[in-house]
Structures are given as structure tokens and as C-alpha cells.
Amino acid sequence: MTYDVIIVGGGIQGVATAYELAKRGAGKILLLEKTILTGGSTGSCAAGIRAQFGSEFNVRLMARSLEIFEHMDEELGYSKEYLELWQGGYLVLAYSEKEFEGLKRNAEVQHRFGLDTAILSPEEVQKDFPRVNIDGVVGATYHSRDGHADPFRVTFAYAEAARKLGVEIREWTPVSEILVENGKVRGVKLQDGSEEYADRVLVTAGAWTTALLKTAGVDLPLWGEKHEILITEPWERVLGPMVISFSRGFYIQQRPHGSFIMGLPPVDPEHWYEPEAFDFSSSMDFLMRMAKEATHVLPFLQGVNIVRQWAGLYEMTPDHHHAIGPVDEVEGLWVAAGGSGHGFMFGPVMAEQLSKWMTGSSMDIDLTPLAPGRFKKGALVVEPAVVG
């Protein structure tokens, strides 16, 4: 069958872009997912949402993404309670003067885009967040509109809205090859050998993107990197914000129902380009390191039981930014992947702006600096505020 656009990948990026394209009249749209919606990185992420970045580019993007999240109930027809949109803020801790100076520079950028980020002394951290251990803390920043949403429910809400606009979504439909003829995309071949055709194919397959693009002769420097998360039993409500440190790499948040979710980057991460190498096993090393960091920052957690831990993949790029836009080597082939641990929070704004790009409309925020061709040109985009 022939479509106007085929999207490969059913995480937040693919599903939200399908909705935005349909809203803009992009024609007949097919979305293909190899397992279930949110079956990849979206379903295993911590789903934090923050505007506390350091580059003007990312701050502007996330300022808009925050607005989209805040009005998602009106846009998609699902309540904030259902979406579990919780804006308890992000508290970013600095453990050196150099790190604190960097946070203050980041806050200046955020202020220019209308974000009310507070710069806090250790004493102010202790006063406002008395459960946080300030030993070694030099300073912090806090933005109250940062927060969290449920990645499953947000994606499912986008999917239902997309279906209402005529988007066809097929789960359990793996794509084995991107079809190319005379330098132009023709469609995709499915694992069962059947083919679907379109003049535009958008790959939003997360860490699986690299292997799929190779079938079209495209080499993208994007790899999978295992990250682990744990969640505790519910506890009394004592912590509002997500507490993070860029230098130490941890993030810890208490969810609305009381459980604490937390993560920490690997010490020596492997770069996995082929799906056969992906490892989703949990490790004792993560558990021990995470327990040490968590009980230092929040000492009361020493008595809280862990319910489970799991692993998922960050889809990494050399500059920790998305690869988003048309692929130079194949006409009609587009990509949107490489969120580098920030894919969920950027998903709505990337979908909004990418859909405008793909339909020939003017983007409010120019995404062309993130086009995948930048890696060959050496035009990397630098972001200083990355966890780990």
C-alpha cells in the first residue's frame, strides 16, 4: 500500500510526530512499531522534564516543550492527572565552585527566555528542601516548572489523538529494510517480506536507528548506551523536586504516589551500534553505586526498600544532541533520534517543529543545526548541562 509518510518507531518521538503531521494535513500516515508503543527507550526512561539547560538552543526548545506539556490536557483531551504531569521542579546541586559558576551562567540563559530559575546558596537549599543533605554542596539552581510526566500515558494519548486524525498505527510490525531506488526513498520492507511504500520515511527508532539506516546506505554516528534505574516502595511525601547533579551524575525524584525513582550513568559505558549487542540486564554494580549516592543526598532513604530495577538504552550522539531532519544521502529519508537521555522531554517540541519542517511550514525554532549531516561536517552543537 502507498502512503504519504511512513514513520518507523513507536516511542514518544514517532507517535507525537505522527499526530503533529496529521494535524498539519500531511496526508496518509502509517506508523510502524516492532513491539508495542513505548516498547523501547520511552518505556524505560525516568521521564523527567527540565528547562535547565545551558545552551540558548536547548533552553528555547525546552521552554516551548514545557508549554506543550502544560497544555497537553487541552491539546490531547486527557487530564493532567491521567498524564501524571507533576511540576515539582528540578533542584540542580553543585559540588564545586566551578560547577556552581556554570549553573549560574546557565541560569542567566534561562532568564533570557523567561524562565524563573532561582540561584540558591547551601543555606537556602537547606531551608527550602530540609531533607536534602548539603554536605559538600556549594550552591544550586531550582526551576519550579520542571517536573515529570508518565511516558506511557503521554505516548498513548498522542497515539489516540493521531488515530482520530486518521493515522494508521501498527504494533508488532518490525521493519527490516528501508527501500531506496536511484537515490530516493521508496518505502520500507517488513520482516515478513511485505512492502509498504511512501515518498517520505521518517526513522524514529531510538538506538535501533543506526542499524536501520545502514540498510539505506546511511552511516549515522548514533549508538545505544545502557543506563539503569531503580524504584523504591512508596514512602511519605517529603520531596518535591527532582534532585540531580551534573558532575556526580545522579538524579532522584519522589513520584506523586510516594515511590522514589533514581538513576546514575555507567562508569565505563559501552557503545553499541548493532541491536544484537544490546544488553538490558540489571547489575549489582549500579545498585551499590546508586544506594551510596542516594543515601548521601537523602539520608532518610537508608530505610526504604527497593521494589525493582531495570535497564534501558540512551540513544547517544557525539555531541549529545538529537539527529533530526533530512538525510543528505537519500532523498525523502528523514530521521529523529539521538535524544541522549533527554528524548522524552524534548519529544513534544521536536515533533511540533519537525512536522512543520516536513510540511514546508516555517519553524518557530530552527532545527536545521541538528540535521544529521552535521557530524560529517564537524559542526557539533555543545550543551554543558548534561547529567553524567
Image: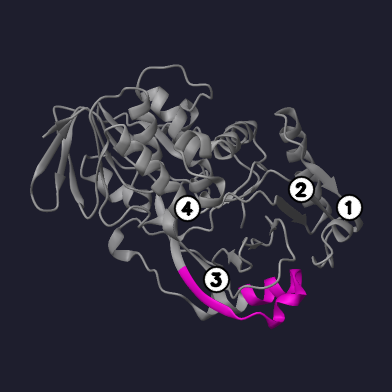
Residue 307: image location, x then y, percent: 53, 77
Residue 272, image quadrant = bottom left
C-alpha separation, residue under disc 4 versus residue under disc 2: 23 Å
Q: Secondary structure at mark 2?
A: strand
In the image shown, does 256 or 311 lie closer to the viewer? 256
Q: Which mark is residue 121?
A: 1
C-alpha separation, residue under disc 2 versus residue under disc 1: 11 Å
Mark before the other along the chain sequence, 2 or 1: 1
C-alpha separation, residue under disc 4 versus residue under disc 1: 33 Å
Let me know if residue 87 appears in the view.
yes
In the image shown, does 73 or 353 lie closer to the viewer? 73
Residue that extends furthest to the right in the rendered view of this protein: 123
Which portion, as a residue range, is magenta?
290-310
Mark before the other along the chain sequence, 4 or 1: 1
C-alpha separation, residue under disc 3 versus residue under disc 4: 16 Å
Q: Are marks 4 and 1 in contact (CB under 8 Å)?
A: no
Q: Which residue is mark 4?
A: 151
Mark before the other along the chain sequence, 4 or 2: 2
Q: Which residue is mark 2?
A: 142
C-alpha separation, residue under disc 3 versus residue under disc 2: 24 Å
Mark before the other along the chain sequence, 3 or 2: 2
Q: Which residue is mark 3?
A: 230
Q: Is residue 300 magenta?
A: yes
- Alpha-carbon neighbours of circle 2 within 10 Å: few (<14), some, or many (≥20)? many
Q: Is residue 314 magenta?
A: no
Q: Secondary structure at mark 3?
A: strand
Which of discs 3 and 1 lies nearer the camera? The answer is 3
Q: Secondary structure at mark 1?
A: loop
Residue 385: image location, x then y, percent: 65, 46
Mark before the other along the chain sequence, 3 or 4: 4
Residue 309: image location, x then y, percent: 50, 73
Helix, strand or loop for the magenta stretch, by majority? helix
